[in-house]
Amino acid sequence: MLGGIGSMSGAALGGLMIGFLSAWSDQYISARWTNAIVFSVLIVVLVFRPHGLLGERAPDKA
């Protein structure tokens, strides 16, 4: 979902982003907050980019 539906490069980018964010959060903030931070970033990205990071808008069908 984060990278975009049907986008393999978006899925890879989203997976790497979640992995680095999770590792960074465990190291510098707290392991208790890791899930909350990851889901917050997921929600923020999908609010501003509903098709994902690299997803493309599908044409409207008549």
Image (cartoon, rainbow, N blue to C red):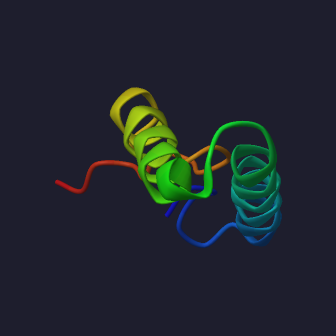
Residue lying at 80% horizontally and 45% vertically, measured from the top left: 24
Residue lying at 16% horizontally and 54% vertically, measured from the top left: 62
Closer to us: 50 or 33: 33
Residue lying at 77% horizontally and 72% vertically, measured from the top left: 8
Residue 12 figure quarter: bottom right
Above or below residue 41? Residue 32 is below
Residue lying at 74% horizontally and 66% vertically, measured from the top left: 15
Residue at the top extreme, as displayed: 48
34 on left or right of 59: right
Above or below residue 28? Residue 20 is below
Q: Position of residue 55 (x, y in %)?
A: 59, 51
Residue 16 figure quarter: bottom right
Q: Position of residue 28 (x, y in %)?
A: 77, 38
> How many numbered discs, if any?
0
- Is residue 51 in view from this perspective? no
Closer to us: 21 or 27: 27
Q: Position of residue 1 (x, y in %)?
A: 49, 64
Above or below residue 62? Residue 50 is above
Above or below residue 62? Residue 9 is below
Residue at the left extreme, as displayed: 62
- Is residue 30 in view from this perspective? yes
